[in-house]
Image (spheres, helix red, strand yellow):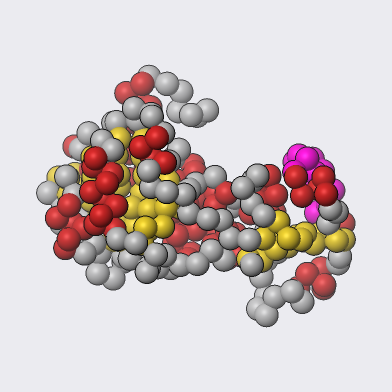
Amino acid sequence: MVSLYGKYACFAALLNKKRVIEGVWMSAATMQAASTCGVFDSPFFEAKKPVVVDKIALDRMFAQPVVHQGIVVKAQPLSSPPLSDLRQNGQASQVVVVLDQVTDPQNVGSILRLCRAFNADGMIMTAAHAPPETGAMAKVASGALEFVPRYIVPNLAHAVRQLKTYGFWVVGLAERGGESIRDVNLTGKIALVLGSEGSGMRKLTLDLCDFKAFLPTCPSFSTLNVTTAAAISLYEAFLAQHLEKRSPLCGA
């Protein structure tokens, strides 16, 4: 069971038909806000009603202080879809993010939010290093957890090889990469691989990349954290794919 909190995270969960919701607690003010967001049309509200409580009661639902914004949703964690869903997608253009030993739930939540913002099709992580779904992760993701599939795989190298059979080009982000990301063709099916902030990508993962790209920065300070690297690379891929199709940048 996961205790979700925060308006964006909770409202998105309530509207996600794949979520199993066990209970909802709201303040009166948040109840009013929910009525304008279509939340009352969710399957949960067809069968049950939220419990209206005050802020103190919501505060007591957590061992540590959290910014719950007047709502808590208890739900079952989302299940991981099979990686083969990406093959069945059938789209000519796809972008996925592959995380190699990125274990911080705050970073994962932030990258999920970026995936949603830049229209990525999913995130791939290993079961051994994927942080469990938590309210903190969902809060940072601002609802993106409900929209961006998290593919949890037993072996990352095997998953990368599978992506290649699906037609993906694998682009590894490395500080000492061979070419600037601006020189890599990011159209078509692209897998962006990012390693942990401490040790980066493992050698096997790096060896499997078709391209090893760096992000151009000031030479005197070239270090970026994994979330910033994800933001820049996803933005570059988003621009490349939409400019290629001459489609509007929003409404994708």
* Furthest residue toward bottom: 63
**Range drawn in magenta:** 30-42
Q: Residue at x 26, y 50 (%)?
A: 160
Q: Quadrant of the N terminus?
A: bottom right
Q: Residue at x 48, y 29 (%)?
A: 252
Quadrant assignment, res 104? bottom left
Residue 27 position, x and y percent, is 83, 60
Compared to 129, does 244 lie above or below?
above
Compared to 236, does 135 lie above or below?
below
Q: Nearer the viewer, residue 75 or 180?
A: 75
Q: Residue at x 41, y 57 (%)?
A: 152
Residue 184 located within the stretch drawn in magenta: no
- Going by the image, does 144 lie left or right of 201? right
- Going by the image, does 24 lie left or right of 114? right
Prevailing SS of the magenta stretch: helix
Q: Nearer the viewer, residue 10 or 1?
A: 1
* Furthest residue toward left: 178
- Going by the image, does 162 lie left or right of 72? left
* Furthest residue toward top: 246
Residue 186 position, x and y percent, is 27, 35
Residue 44 position, x and y percent, is 77, 49
Compared to 41, does 57 lie above or below?
below
Quadrant assignment, res 6? bottom right
Residue 56 shows up from this direction: yes
Residue 56 position, x and y percent, is 82, 73
Q: Residue at x 75, y 45 (%)?
A: 43
